[in-house]
Image: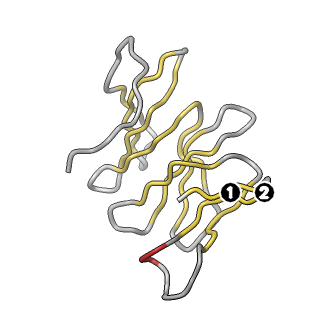
Amino acid sequence: MACDSGNRHGICLMGTRLSAGDDAVVLFEDDLPLGEPAWSPDGEWLLFSRDTVAAGGIWMMHRTGSEPSQVLSGAATTPAWGPEGRRFAVSLTVGGQRDIYVVDLEDGSRTNLTRSAAQDRYPSWRW
């Protein structure tokens, strides 16, 4: 989950993934807004949005809290993993138009799925 403390923003673990009696464990903390974390199907990786001065993007990190790496730049939000864990769907703005794209993590290619005049948001995979 996304968590904030003062002027800091974080990605935190809570609940069943922690041992009894633990509070939230901060996996990553930043001065920039973070949000919309999504666990990979195998529970090893986490995608999340990260707002940057340049426009933001989608970042990925290992569940152990490794340094995140950017997997998609631009005005992207609400990542949703594909069932095989190689791709994710995302709401991405290109040329002023927000559509749903699928991004391949192996080669970085992206495919526009919606191409509509509407501002498409909140992708979801049907398993």
Q: Residue at x 31, y 42 (%)?
A: 124
Q: Residue at x 44, y 44 (%)?
A: 79
In this view, the residue in front, 87 or 27, is 27
Residue for point 35% across, 17% down = 115
Q: Residues within 10 Å of mark 2 (few under 14, many from 20)?
A: few
| Relative to 12, 40 lies left or right | left
Q: Are marks 2 and 1 in contact (CB under 8 Å)?
A: yes
Q: Which picture quadrant has residue 113?
A: top left
Residue 69 at x, y percent in the picture: 60, 54
Locate residue 16 relative to residue 1 in the image: left or right: left
Q: Which label is found at residue 78?
A: none
Residue 75 found in image quarter: top right
Residue in the foreground of this view, choosing between 101 and 86: 101
Query: Looking at the image, is 92 positioned above or below residue 6?
Result: above
Where disc 2 sits, the SS reads loop
- Whether 117 is drawn above or below 11: the answer is above
Q: Which residue is mark 2?
A: 6
Amino acid under disc 2: Gly
Tell me which amino acid carries mark 1.
Answer: Asp
Q: Residue furthest left?
A: 127
> Tag on residue 4?
1
- The part of the image, by quadrant, that contains residue 56 is top right
- Where residue 41 sits in the image (x, y, percent)? 33, 62
